[in-house]
């Protein structure tokens, strides 16, 4: 289904998703309007709001059958200072390419925009579509809480979240709702295609992409390897299980969304909410899927065109740290280890009691379970290195004797010679950590006094490469290195000397760089 407002003009700019060029006389104007949305706003305004786009679905999708009792959905589209023509094109693409019987309503959540066209003019324009409702928020909620405001008033059995600069393609909705109908704990995501920010052309993307993350919780796309596709005979139309969702576009059963406790409402403005919901869904019994027969174009931009009430980077970091604290269990050290500046900053993540209680109440599984069952290909060693800690010059190993440290002949079977080098840069023996104390070194419970327990080792970025094998402590202003004392039995710290082999150390095995 692909309805139009008026007979289609095949020569209209951007028609059929074609690229548009800015006329040379309008270059200046186009350039100056770019910042209104961080994409080519001038071109967007030239393109019909109900343009056709190529049907990019894989072969076979249009023949797929769906049940005739699919649930209805509420479309929730949040925006702050969205460009007029782009917002209209988003709404029209939903109205023109969705079976009306499946759309309960379209809720536009105006997140306290500052632009005049998003107030009375928008209300006026949308009044011709009875299904479109507009919620003007009285203060800036941020994307996460704005979505929740929309969800609270939604009446459809399924919530479908969309960004405000999208174009839904032919047949986009039915396969999403079909998945949710199959199981109410399935969260269905369309394939996100690309509307060029420069020429507004509609471009398809490679098939077989999964949503993944890398440390410290950066979202990304990852192609399923060809041999896995062949071995498992995965077809282009098969749904793809995703460790994490991109976040902007998805359908979820409304009651299930509330059972899951929605998003953590303590997340601010933008960022990390896709991680939070993904972990929550997988660990608490649901699934996240990309549905290849559902395709929605999205304008990807280099920068958010709206302001952040607080600093953007800090906001996202704080959101991610909240997610790590609630969901990552012992693996949160990997997050902090890859974003070590957060440890030094003593970031305040706010109160987590409710989120932790929720996880208990829902009886969610562990993050280890998630890694083993949902994302086994993630490289996630719990410590950076482990085993014996051998001095290169002396060829002896650090040994715990009662509560003191000594150097003895190395013995892999000696429990007292086992150390972990952790993501938080600690040299840990059970619950005890090696730390400098004056010129000597002592063992102390690891929880207390974190920065003074940190040792740098094989950290190329932070150190001159000559100190790669050293264990460098950075207490006070000066750095110092772990070394063998004159008796050859005790340990101490001394001025770093890249040539001194008695300052070089090696762990039994290394699990990460
Ligand atoms: N948004 C919002 N309030 C905010 C930030 C964003 O309503 O404080 C809306 C924004 O207008 C967009 C959606 O949330 O429709 C997602 O934001 P954006 O497109 O900037 O994220 P991206 O697609 O770049 O990840
Ligand atoms: Mn977006």
Image (cartoon, rainbow, N blue to C red):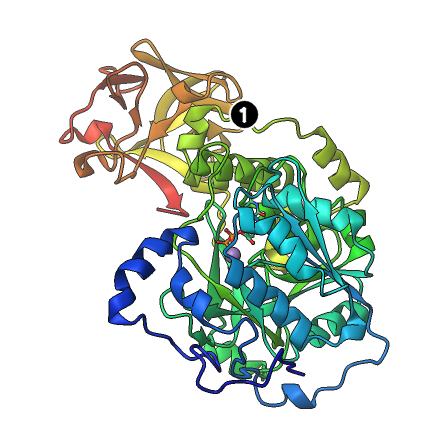
Q: Judging from the image, what secondary structure is the residue with disc 1 in?
A: loop
**Residue at x-position 55% and y-position 84%:** 55
Q: Nearer the viewer, residue 441 or 202?
A: 202
**Residue at x-position 63% and y-position 79%:** 238
Q: Quadrant of the N terminus?
A: bottom right
Q: Is residue 249 above or below residue 420?
A: below
Residue 368 picture location, percent across and down? 62, 49
> Looking at the rendering, which quadrant does residue 138 occupy?
top right
**Residue at x-position 81% and y-position 40%:** 361
Q: Dot 1: within a 10 Å radius of its alpha carbon, few (fewer than 14), some, or many (20 or more) residues?
A: few
Residue 197 picture location, percent across and down? 40, 64
Which residue in the rendered view is the most extreme toward the left?
499
Q: Is any atom of residue 40 visible in this view?
A: no
Ligand 1 neighbours mark 1 (CB distance < 8 Å)? no
Q: Nearer the viewer, residue 454 or 264?
A: 264
Q: Is residue 67 above or below residue 182?
A: below
> Looking at the rendering, which quadrant does residue 19 occupy?
bottom left
Q: Which residue is mark 1?
A: 348
Residue 232 picture location, percent across and down? 58, 80
**Residue at x-position 47% and y-position 54%:** 379
Q: Is residue 65 left or right of residue 55?
A: right
């Amino acid at each position: 289904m692909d309805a139009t407002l008026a007979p289609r003009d095949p020569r209209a700019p951007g028609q059929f998703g074609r690229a548009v060029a800015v006329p040379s006389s309008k270059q200046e104007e186009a350039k100056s309007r770019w910042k209104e949305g961080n994409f080519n706003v001038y071109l967007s305004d030239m393109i019909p709001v109900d343009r056709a786009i190529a049907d990019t679905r894989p072969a076979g999708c249009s023949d797929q059958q769906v049940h005739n009792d699919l649930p209805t959905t509420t479309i929730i589209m949040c925006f702050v200072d969205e460009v007029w023509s782009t917002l209209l094109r988003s709404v029209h693409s939903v109205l023109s390419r969705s079976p009306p019987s499946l759309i309960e309503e379209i809720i536009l959540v105006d997140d306290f925009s500052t632009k005049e066209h998003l107030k009375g003019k928008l209300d006026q324009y949308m009044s011709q579509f009875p299904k479109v409702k507009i919620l003007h928020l009285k203060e800036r909620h941020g994307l996460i809480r704005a979505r929740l405001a929309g969800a609270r008033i939604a009446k459809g059995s399924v919530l479908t979240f969309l960004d405000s600069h999208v174009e839904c393609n032919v047949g986009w909705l039915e396969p999403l709702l079909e998945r949710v109908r199959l199981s109410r704990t399935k969260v269905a995501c369309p394939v996100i295609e690309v509307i060029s920010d420069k020429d507004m052309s509609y471009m398809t993307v490679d098939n077989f992409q999964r949503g993944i993350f890398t440390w410290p919780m950066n979202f990304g796309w990852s192609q399923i390897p060809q041999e896995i596709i062949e071995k498992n005979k995965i077809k282009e139309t098969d749904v793809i299980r995703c460790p994490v969702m991109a976040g902007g576009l998805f359908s979820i059963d409304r009651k299930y969304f509330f059972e899951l406790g929605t998003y953590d409402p303590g997340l601010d403005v933008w960022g990390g909410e896709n991680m939070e919901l993904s972990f929550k869904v997988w660990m608490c019994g649901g699934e996240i899927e990309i549905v290849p027969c559902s395709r929605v174009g999205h304008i990807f931009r280099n920068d958010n065109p709206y302001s952040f009430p607080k600093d953007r980077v800090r906001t996202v970091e704080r959101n991610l740290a909240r997610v790590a604290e609630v969901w990552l269990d012992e693996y949160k050290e990997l997050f902090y280890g890859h974003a070590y500046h957060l440890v030094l900053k003593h970031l305040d993540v706010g109160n987590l009691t409710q989120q932790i209680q929720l996880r208990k109440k829902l009886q969610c599984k562990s993050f280890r379970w998630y890694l083993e069952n949902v994302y086994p290909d993630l490289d996630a060693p719990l410590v950076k290195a482990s085993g014996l800690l051998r001095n290169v010059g002396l060829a002896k190993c650090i040994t715990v004797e009662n509560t003191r440290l000594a150097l003895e002949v190395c013995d892999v079977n000696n429990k007292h010679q086992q150390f972990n080098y952790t993501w938080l840069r600690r040299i840990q023996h059970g619950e005890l950590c090696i730390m400098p104390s004056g010129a000597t070194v002592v063992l102390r419970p690891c929880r207390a006094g974190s920065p003074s327990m940190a040792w740098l080792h094989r950290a190329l970025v932070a150190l001159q490469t000559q100190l790669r094998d050293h264990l460098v402590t950075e207490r006070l202003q000066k750095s110092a290195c772990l070394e063998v004392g004159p008796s050859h039995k005790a340990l101490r710290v001394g001025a770093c000397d890249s040539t001194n082999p008695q300052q070089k150390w090696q762990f039994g095995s290394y699990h990460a760089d």
